[in-house]
Image: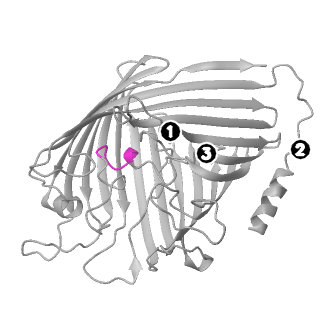
């Protein structure tokens, strides 16, 4: 820890105090207010339902107030929010129900270096590994320090985190539900931004995760490394392509050696200004359960925005697999996007899901489970009622197979669907220079 503190002090010395604190209109205060209620009808979302399961319906809501202060060489951000379900709080309540989503301060200088510390969102590339998880009512943020350098052609970020559950006198604590999922984190990210047609990035992340003992010792941390690339290409105005590839190694919490990987390829083609076609495939390696492997082969997409990638019904990675299974996923999809006007957009996406590892079959004569899990259809409409108000709604259905019952539970012969409608108020209520 002494080395880490010395490193941070050295970084702070790179940012001398500004000499021009009295210039007119140098300081700016911005305030944004968001309220986003969303009504959902769940009849097989996240986990497939059985024939005797009743549908669920509720309205969740996010209310978020964000402040940003900017002066020469210094910016600060504070975001407080209330996230929950309508009706969960008593009419007369003394229970605290507001949390801090972001609270950070950033130093910067004219050469492009910056240092940002505090609770902050870590969202990179297409948000596959690190994402804001904006679909979730509460969102996702991390406690840590981020430093780096940015100019017109290069971005280089270094992120560091060291987490605890409480102010301990001796030792440390095992992480319980609701706390940050890792003890330590070191991440390096680089992106080349000098070309509109070719934008590659590289990521390396080292996570230290406690193995379950209640007393913290460095020898009890399992270290897992994730490294990979995300490449965006723009061959022409009408076409685009994106490639992601990541590999994981190190140790799992159980002590097994990790060897897992994932790859995703997506292409899109704008037929005209109103119609776009999208197609792609995501492959995430899985863990077999037909024999005792010496390595753990299931890829973990970590802290990404999973709702964005693996079907809107959130069957995969946004929710758990059945039992102790982690069979991987192969998601092949095709989508159509229609934009009749500047304010209205519609989309339809078809997914076909399959597992990528060998899983034993608990019924029938075939010893191995068939890999096909079924098809999902996702429909969505977004309508900008005005600049700061957007109405969105969607409907999805899953047409599963018997293999889905083994992997996720439920009954594939029962109709599975999900619908939602949301309105997002997000005005800027203050922007003041002084």
Q: Is residue 312 magenta?
A: yes
The front one of 390 and 178 is: 178
Instruction: Judge the density around disc 3: few (<14), some (14-19), many (≥20) Cα neighbours within 10 Å.
Output: many
Image location (x, y in percent) of residue 163 = 60, 60
Q: Nearer the viewer, mark 2 or mark 1?
A: 1
Sequence-first disc among 2 and 3: 2
Nearest the viewer among 137 and 353 is 137
Is residue 430 visible in the rendered image? The answer is: yes
Looking at this view, name the residue that lies furthest to the top: 386
Residue 395 visible? The answer is no
Q: Nearer the viewer, mark 1 or mark 3?
A: 1
Dot 2 alpha-carbon crowd within 10 angstroms: few under 14, some 14 to 19, many 20 or more: few
Foreground pick, 221 / 421: 221
Left or right, residue 406 beside residue 422 = left
Return the disc, 1 or 3, that comes first in the chain's sequence. 1
Label 1 crowd bin: few (<14), some (14–19), many (20+), radius 10 Å? few
Q: Is residue 386 left or right of residue 101?
A: left
Prevailing secondary structure of the magenta residues: loop
Query: Mark 3 highlights which residue?
Result: 120
Cα–Cα gap, marks 2 and 1: 39 Å
Expressed as whole percent of the image width and height from the top left, the position of residue 12 reads 82, 51
> First in sequence: mark 2 or mark 1?
2
Q: Which residue is mark 2?
A: 16
Helix, strand, or loop for circle 1?
loop
Q: Quadrant of the N terminus?
A: bottom right
Q: Start and end of the magenta stretch?
A: 307-313
Which numbered disc covers residue 96?
Answer: 1
Q: Is residue 310 above or below residue 423?
A: below
């Amino acid at each position: 820890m002494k080395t880490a503190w010395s490193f941070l002090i050295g970084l702070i010395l790179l940012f001398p105090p500004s000499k021009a604190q009295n210039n007119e209109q140098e300081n700016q205060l911005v305030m944004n207010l968001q309220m986003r209620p969303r009504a959902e009808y769940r009849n097989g979302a996240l986990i497939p339902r059985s024939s005797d399961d009743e549908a669920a319906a509720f309205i969740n809501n996010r209310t978020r107030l964000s402040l940003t202060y900017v002066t020469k060489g210094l910016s600060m951000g504070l975001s407080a929010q209330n996230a929950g379900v309508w009706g969960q709080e008593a009419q007369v309540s003394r229970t605290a129900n507001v949390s801090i989503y972001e609270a950070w301060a950033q130093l910067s200088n004219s050469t492009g270096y910056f240092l940002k510390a505090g609770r902050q969102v870590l969202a990179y590339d297409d948000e596959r590994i690190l994402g804001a998880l904006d679909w979730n009512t509460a969102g996702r943020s991390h406690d840590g320090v981020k430093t780096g350098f940015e100019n017109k052609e290069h971005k280089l970020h270094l992120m560091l985190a060291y987490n605890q559950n409480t102010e301990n006198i001796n030792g440390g604590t095992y992480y319980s539900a609701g706390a940050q999922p890792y003890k330590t984190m070191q991440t390096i990210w680089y992106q080349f931004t000098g070309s509109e047609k070719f934008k590659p990035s590289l990521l390396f992340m080292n996570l230290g995760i406690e193995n379950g003992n209640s007393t913290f010792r460095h020898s009890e941390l399992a270290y897992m490394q994730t490294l990979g690339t995300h490449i965006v290409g723009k061959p022409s105005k009408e076409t685009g392509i994106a490639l992601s590839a990541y590999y994981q190694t190190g140790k799992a919490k159980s002590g097994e050696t990790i060897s897992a990987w994932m790859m995703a390829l997506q292409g899109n083609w704008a037929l005209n200004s109103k119609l776009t076609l999208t197609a792609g495939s995501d492959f995430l390696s899985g863990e077999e359960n037909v024999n005792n492997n010496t390595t753990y082969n299931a890829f973990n997409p970590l802290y990404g925005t999973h709702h964005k990638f693996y079907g809107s019904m959130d069957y995969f990675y946004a929710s758990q697999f059945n039992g102790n299974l982690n069979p991987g996923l192969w998601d092949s999809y095709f989508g159509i996007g229609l934009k009749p006007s500047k304010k209205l957009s519609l989309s339809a996406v078809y997914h076909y899901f399959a597992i990528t590892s060998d899983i034993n079959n608990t019924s029938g004569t075939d010893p191995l489970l068939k890999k096909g899990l079924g098809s999902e259809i996702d429909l969505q409409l977004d309508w900008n009622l005005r600049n700061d108000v957007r109405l969105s709604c969607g409907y999805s259905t899953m047409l599963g197979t018997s293999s889905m019952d083994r992997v996720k539970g439920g009954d594939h012969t029962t109709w599975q669907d999900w619908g939602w409608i949301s309105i997002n108020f997000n005005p800027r209520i203050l922007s003041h220079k002084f």
